[in-house]
Image: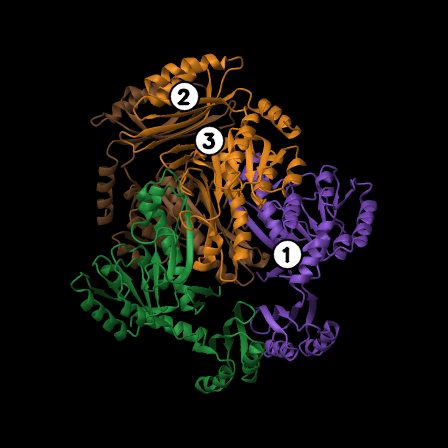
Chain colours: A purple, B green, C brown, D orange
Amino acid sequence: MNMYTDKRADFYKDRYENRARLIIKCPDQPGIVSAISTFLWNEQANIVSSNQFTVNPKGGEFFMRLDFEYQPGTNVEKLKKEFQEVAERFQMEWRLSLVHELKNIAIFVSKEPHCLLELLWEWQSGDLMANIPVVISNHENSREMVEALGIDFYHLPVTKETKQEIEAKQKEILEDYDIDLIILARYMQILSPTFVEVFKNRIINIHHSFLPAFIGAKPYERAFERGVKMIGATSHYVTNDLDEGPIIEQGTEPVSHEHNVDDLKKIGQSIERRVLAQAVKWHLEDRIIVYGNKTIVFE
Amino acid sequence: MNMYTDKRADFYKDRYENRARLIIKCPDQPGIVSAISTFLWNEQANIVSSNQFTVNPKGGEFFMRLDFEYQPGTNVEKLKKEFQEVAERFQMEWRLSLVHELKNIAIFVSKEPHCLLELLWEWQSGDLMANIPVVISNHENSREMVEALGIDFYHLPVTKETKQEIEAKQKEILEDYDIDLIILARYMQILSPTFVEVFKNRIINIHHSFLPAFIGAKPYERAFERGVKMIGATSHYVTNDLDEGPIIEQGTEPVSHEHNVDDLKKIGQSIERRVLAQAVKWHLEDRIIVYGNKTIVFE
Amino acid sequence: MNMYTDKRADFYKDRYENRARLIIKCPDQPGIVSAISTFLWNEQANIVSSNQFTVNPKGGEFFMRLDFEYQPGTNVEKLKKEFQEVAERFQMEWRLSLVHELKNIAIFVSKEPHCLLELLWEWQSGDLMANIPVVISNHENSREMVEALGIDFYHLPVTKETKQEIEAKQKEILEDYDIDLIILARYMQILSPTFVEVFKNRIINIHHSFLPAFIGAKPYERAFERGVKMIGATSHYVTNDLDEGPIIEQGTEPVSHEHNVDDLKKIGQSIERRVLAQAVKWHLEDRIIVYGNKTIVFE
Amino acid sequence: MNMYTDKRADFYKDRYENRARLIIKCPDQPGIVSAISTFLWNEQANIVSSNQFTVNPKGGEFFMRLDFEYQPGTNVEKLKKEFQEVAERFQMEWRLSLVHELKNIAIFVSKEPHCLLELLWEWQSGDLMANIPVVISNHENSREMVEALGIDFYHLPVTKETKQEIEAKQKEILEDYDIDLIILARYMQILSPTFVEVFKNRIINIHHSFLPAFIGAKPYERAFERGVKMIGATSHYVTNDLDEGPIIEQGTEPVSHEHNVDDLKKIGQSIERRVLAQAVKWHLEDRIIVYGNKTIVFE
């Protein structure tokens, strides 16, 4: 852990001392909100914000994200145990977390550093509520700026032959740093299915096109060939179908005949930075729920 | 009532037959959501969507908008009476309405018809959930297109001398048509304080600038003189301080040195159309709550 | 010709009396601008605006759009003949037109009238510099609003069997009205290759997706299935490859998990209106040059 | 000079070896374009891009920005001398520069580093065509990140008493580094009139509101009080009337009732970064011409 991480943890502990968050998924039926809010009221907890969504209003699924302040001195473990009774009644999948407990992020990057830089910039200025203990790259070029921030940097070049071995090494690092979320910040290697499986819905990628347009390689080149008047970027959770995972956020910018492929890349970089950082923030604040191949994003 | 209005009423009655909406404002305290949701659960009602907001989390005010489906055959008047008990416990200001009961709109317009046309367009294509029985103008030029839609049109020119008399006539018309909401769709006359008082938070105006920039007359001319690179429009509730009422929505578009005043007006018209129509829709769906000189908009 | 058309023609004749426009395409080489501007100077003409673009700066193609004011009393036919000498020297494809000479538009539409309405709205308020003498539809439902504006309306339903015969009828109408530009304002029939060939680069279509995403049928349904966070629309010239013609303009809007397919359609309609109207205006002002399967748009 | 600066200079020298740029302002009259383009043709130079604009078409002023490639081995000083004859004929104010000659930037900053960081980020990744040899601040906190990039950092705290003396010191530094452009990247001190006079149209400021709304101090606080639904930022040249100088670029973002003052600042920072960086790039590429209190921006 580095200096930034320690300061951050203290700051959030102070600010969100008694703040907890409940994420819920269950079959829709009358009485859910009543049961939850009555439970919290009995604990003298105060609901700070609440979002809900029902897929297919009749007979569908119910999703909720709810922040509350509990009474100082509350035994949160006991509270969880008691909530279990409510949860079982409604067949809930649920998770109760303390808002000041920060997630640990590992960033994977290849040669182009713009997305990495954006994340580090946001983090350094206190806008990413997370710890970033480690960056892993198949190139050396970002080492200096990463280490300057007190973040560990691992250079793990990948070849066809070493791929399996490198992934083993990566997993070891991820375990060592107790990583909750992996960000592929323009990491140009494809992860193996077993790797993806371990981190299901916990790997966020940025694809440099407006999916499903220009799936796969060289999207800016193909956008130029087609003569589009807008380009875009897409952040999504990684699945084993290339560029087909649940979409989190997308952005676009206008372009014109005056722009060549290099111009498109340049304009695209600023979209990528924005769209990836947004997705990461939403994930860190538990605003994203994956259902099927889609996401619910409680903005 | 005209053909469009009748069809619309039938359509919404069908679609939202058992849908009700609760708007609530009260001092914040623990237990509010629990009390409301438990009340609804006891009535076997199902919460369809719910938004809440607290101004100043500690010791502040609580606002809620909640849509629910009640059981077919429910006696809504009895339900209201029973809710009164909950409301009193929490000192609520509240309103329970049936979603299919449409509001009646009167549109005031002067010479420029673009905002009127946008509203009629949205209404005709079924996107404005309201009745529009009457249009009032101090000019004749919009009569034809209004009457073609089966809407009554009153030409009431205003002079300094006749102003009081005309307002009396306007009020009479508004009563005759049982008007809930007045839209000033580029109506270039200032309404008297007593008129405004009667329709408090029920008159929506569109101002052709990005308030508080260019308050008052000739905003596009002044924007041109200043050499701004963006122009805008603002929809707001009318108060007796000119262009100072609670803002509902704002929009902007880029402009350049190539645009003269006429170009700014043209670009501005499309912003005005969009920003006014958005505000009107939010009002019709009870998404706006005024507090102090601001609005809460539950999008 | 109807009342609107006549008024419009007079207005533009007055405003742009001595304004001409030169569109040029030729192999790039030094001296082109010098030759053109010197020619105009010798005619005592004043260049009002000028745009140029070179594809592949070295050894590529040169494109230019230039507006100029000629001296009152200038013999434009003579001027054209004299320019021919310059044009030949540089192997130009060129066109010189008088700005006040309006193009004649035919709008094709099926059941959904939103794009038609937008165009008529823009036209009626003087923002489309064109004549619109005729609308052709395979449905009856837009007749009333079209004829109310003094525009002729032809109801030509299309079946597999009658397709050829109907196209013959359509061509006849287009000739009768001396049509320069066809707009497919959500016209859900595919035109035959020979029809398209006759009106090469003079048929503008609006496709209800962000091409090349969701080519073909039911784009909103497929966007919903994929869980995208933005939808879009694309205006393009029609070629015989479905949705593959040169793109003129594209637009996008954000959407969320709260939107169902109907919501996407509604949001999409406003993008379609905007994107189609923009493309039509650019075409009418001769701002678009097609090269290969792309467009140069001199904004 | 630092490592980045040297590499940059080499890169641009290579890329734009024979590229020159002509900026022209003169009374409008026929024959200007002809004279310029014929002059260039006689030099066997090739026009790469060209923009022109006339304020008040009849009897107004003509502005032009023109990039051209000259023949290798051309004596540019001689070319300038010969162009002087053309310039005099049309009473031109003009400037001919070599595109690869980079301008020298000094950045002034106070405590908030987000705008400084954005500029350094853009510069480091090769997107700002300039040298940045020096940063001047009245606070210490940015020293580390500035010096890490090989840029000199001067900490010059300002008090009422020392203001004059500090400005003298600043001017000395600006001369030592041969500075062409000063960027006030959230520098919270007001420069004296004599200082501003020396750098007329060469000091770019970012104001954290959508001017002319919220001129002066604490714009985000006032925006919050007013309950606006959009906030913005404005980049402009500094004059001696506070926040009244010629506007270069503006940007806006939507906000809602859920945002407190801190949220507005955070959202605003990203607008400020974007709007300032855009203005700086346009200045560096000589795309901005000031006339009166407005700017022409040849995008």
**Image quadrant of residue B94?**
bottom left
Would you name the residue on which mark 3 appears?
D199
Q: Is residue A284 above or below residue A18?
A: above
Q: For the residues tagged 1 and 2, is the chain the same?
A: no
Q: Looking at the picture, tell me which residue is in the foreground, B103 or C17.
A: B103
- Which quadrant would the N terminus of chain B be assigned to in this image? bottom left
Q: Report the disc number at residue C32.
A: 2
Q: Chain of mark 3?
A: D
Q: For the residues tagged 1 and 3, is the chain the same?
A: no
**Image quadrant of residue A202?**
bottom right
> Dot 3: few (<14), some (14–19), or many (≥20) neighbours within 10 Å?
some
Q: Is residue B17 above or below residue C286?
A: below
Circles 3, 2 touching at the beta carbon (< 8 Å) = no
**Amino acid type at mark 3:** Phe
Residue B39 in view of the camera: yes
Q: Looking at the picture, tell me which residue is in the foreground, B65 or C266.
A: B65
Q: Chain of mark 1?
A: A
Q: CA distance from mark 1 to mark 3?
A: 53 Å
**Amino acid type at mark 1:** Pro
Would you name the residue on which mark 1 appears?
A246
Q: Report the disc number at residue C91.
A: none
Q: Position of residue B140 (x, y in %)?
A: 20, 59
Q: Is residue C236 left or right of residue C179?
A: right
Please state the total of marks drawn on the protein image. 3
Of tags 3 and 2, the one toward the viewer is: 3
Q: Chain of mark 2?
A: C
Q: Position of residue C141 (x, y in %)?
A: 34, 60
Q: CA distance from mark 1 to mark 2?
A: 53 Å
Q: Which secondary structure, mark 1?
A: loop
Q: Which secondary structure, mark 2?
A: helix
Q: Position of residue B96 (x, y in %)?
A: 45, 78
